[in-house]
Amino acid sequence: MSEEQLKLLLKGLIKLPNETEWVEFKENNSDPKVIGEYISALSNSACLHDKEKAYLVYGVSDIGHEVKGTNFKPKQTKIGNQELENWIATQLNPRIDFVIYEFEYESKPMVLFEIQPTFNTPVAFKNIQYIRVGTYKKHLADFPEKLRKIWSKDNMTTFEDEFAAKNVDADEVLKFIDYPEYFNLMNLPLPPNKDSILEKLCEEEIIKREGYNYNITNLGAILFARNLNNFGRLSRKAVRVIIYKGKNRLQTIREQVGGKGYAVGFEGLIDYINDKLPINEEIGKAFRKEVKMYPELAIRELVANAIIHQDFRETGSGPMVEIFDDRIEISNPGKPLIDPLRFIDHSPKSRNEKLASLMRRMNICEERGSGIDKVINESETYQLPAPKFIEENNSMKVVMYSFKKLVNMDKQDKIRACYQHCCLKYVSNEAMTNSSLRERFKIAENNYSTASRIIADTIEADLIKDYDPDNNSKKYKKYIPIWA
């Protein structure tokens, strides 16, 4: 939020008749443990009262709501070697989002914590759940009826529909949103006047009208922000590109954090990544020496997937691209909604359907269900090891490896490539054969036994099966994925 927006918000909070169960006023009590307990209590209470946000305000007296200012400076406060904000976040479970603002109101220093309400799961601080009862902070366990209500609450509002900025006027909308680039990406003529521009942005739900002013949706800000730093917590969702020296994370050469919205900054992001990728060595007659190690189409699709399929409710992190000498890793917060083994054939599921739809309409990513197929196909064309899809605790990672000869691939590399090749054939209404696998690995025809060994290992790994078990000719057998 801008300082003007913060002032308007605080003015409204001060007008509340008494402290509510979703707002707490303090002056200078900056005990980190107390702050953590209040964040738990306020988040749980905001859930119960169906509030969009909860607030912890420093610099206002709890009686009379008199503005006094505060000497608390949370962004300069540390617990050991950790910043206060990070320390509190690590003690919360689940890790709901909160943003700390420091600003002036009536020439007095103020601090405001904007806190996300929880849904389904009560928030605990240091394994204890708190709740507000009237103006008091209590243990939630002592109020089982409130506990039951939180467990039964569902978040019916999607991330895209929530507001990144509220109550901004028309000029601020056009200042914060890169509307010319929106019309450019949509291949639409720029309307002749401000009202027509705003009407189109409303139609796309990039903004929503409220009285004489507007609210900018998360959808609008995350895709079309001129600068994500204008939208507080959304700045944490900017794409990070980190380039390392060697094959590990011991030495960082460069780190770049995106500043624009995903849509308006996408082409620049892809150009930046491709510019930093290594050049391929000569692989054969089909390739010149000056060829990028990784196919641009595959990089483009994987970065778009990381953006589209991330879980925006996972706080403190966004999509990340890490470049090593021998591989590139592209990750995003949030577990995948489908089994990574079924990425090639399964109809895609997304937490962020509006965002995905807009990005497809702007041709930033491929049509539904075709993206990963193209990644696998490009990897085979470039004779790269098969991409590796890794589901981690609260994130998804895809690893693309640089060129490696078959003799230098380990058993798992070969099994993964065989399985993906089999899936690719199956979704193309074909079946994998010894011949097609030899073509994938560029194995000479007289070495068909090498391909047979890889196929046998992949069958043993329970990833593929015989299409016709009664056919006893290994050379002419057909294979399909185990799930087919």
Image (cartoon, helix red, strand yellow):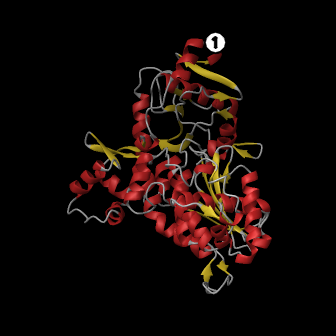
Horizontal and vertical percent for residue 214? 31, 45
Report the front residue among 170 and 308: 308
Relative side of 81 to 21, left or right: right
Horizontal and vertical percent for residue 126? 71, 29
Reading the image, the residue beneath label 1 is: 142
> For the point 64% across and 75% down, which residue is it?
293
Report the front residue among 185 and 109: 185
Q: Residues within 10 Å of mark 1 (few under 14, many from 20)?
A: few
Relative side of 263 to 113, left or right: left
Residue 249 seen from this side: no
> Could you say which quadrant of the image residue 143 lies in?
top right
Query: In this picture, is 55 found above or below 251?
Result: above
Relative side of 353 to 386, left or right: left
Give amino acid for label 1: Asp
Query: In this picture, is 354 found above or below 323?
Result: above
Residue 222 seen from this side: yes
Horizontal and vertical percent for residue 24? 53, 26
Q: Element at badge 1?
A: helix
Horizontal and vertical percent for residue 41? 59, 25
> For the point 45% across and 54% down, which residue is it?
368
Report the front residue among 232 and 454: 454
Tally the marks: 1
> For the point 20% across and 63% down, which residue is it?
192
